[in-house]
Image: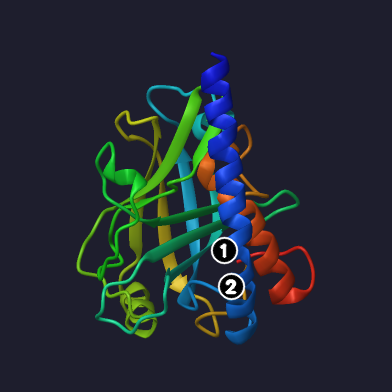
Amino acid sequence: MAAVATGGRLVGDLARGAGRLVAVPLGAIAQWRGGKPMHPRGVVFDAVLERRGSTPVWGVPWLDAQSSDQAVVRLSRGAGLPAPLPDLLGLAVRLPGPAPVDLLLSTTGRGRLTRLVPVPRRDTAAVYSSIMGYRSDAGTLRLAALPEADGVSSDPEELAGDVSRHSLRFTLAAARGTGPWQPFGRLVLVEPVAGLDPDVMFDAVQNPPPGLAPDGPMARFRAPAYARARAARTGTTRAR
């Protein structure tokens, strides 16, 4: 047990160190790009996040609840490469309020192990995973958005037009460890907001869903990287 604990601390320390190392160039890129070190090209949508309750019940109220909430969603290209080149696509979700909830998902595989691996895509209607684990009463969980369509451009202008004509839907799901995805809700993108890509900021480490605590190497990596990006972007504690 002591060896396992020591190994866990070592992995955590390495992740934090890597995050601090990456934070320096991220801060420089943020200044160069006017505030967005990654995912510089995207489009923001008004959306609805419907939670219908999960089966089986997780014992995590936010996942098990039934609710329909207005949301803000940003779909983006990670490196800002021009379409139709593949890029690491991002899906960021915010539930506004006094205690906002932010989810940051990236294109990955759908399988038990490939859900942990970032995968460049061309099609916005792809599988997105949190990659980062969340500590909860149900164990370590990950979240995903599973597409209900395909053939949707990831170019921001084309994507905005596609969603204006036909709303885009994702099934929201959770999984324990490498277990199967279990649906708990749906995310419906309704229409792009004015200005196509206004400066909306998300922070999955500071604003997790209630009952879910960011945990593991990815959370420890993100924390210092986000902090530097926030400082470079606004001079205050904010993030993409």
Q: Picture coordinates of residue 208 (x, y %)?
A: 61, 44
Q: Amino acid at mark 2?
A: Pro
Label 2: state its secondary structure: helix
Q: Which mark is residue 25?
A: 2
Residue 202 seen in the current view: no
The N terminus sits in image quarter? top right
x 44%, y 48%: residue: 130
Q: Position of residue 135 (x, y in %)?
A: 56, 31
Q: Is residue 60 left or right of residue 123?
A: right
Residue on which disc 1 sits: 22
Pick the front one: 93 or 104: 104
The residue sitting at the left extreme is: 151
Q: Residue furthest top?
A: 1
Quarter of the image with the C terminus in it: bottom right
Residue 67 screen position, x and y as percent: 53, 41
Q: Is residue 146 depicted above or below 34 in this figure?
A: above
Does residue 30 appear in the picture of this structure?
yes
Under tag 1, what secondary structure? helix
Query: Residue drawn at (50%, 34%), measured in percent from left and top?
Result: 63
Q: Is residue 138 left or right of residue 212?
A: left
Residue at far right of view = 236
The amino acid type found where label 1 is placed reads: Val
Q: Are marks 1 and 2 in contact (CB under 8 Å)?
A: yes
> Residue visible at 48% across and 44% down?
132
Which sits in the foreground, 59 or 83? 83
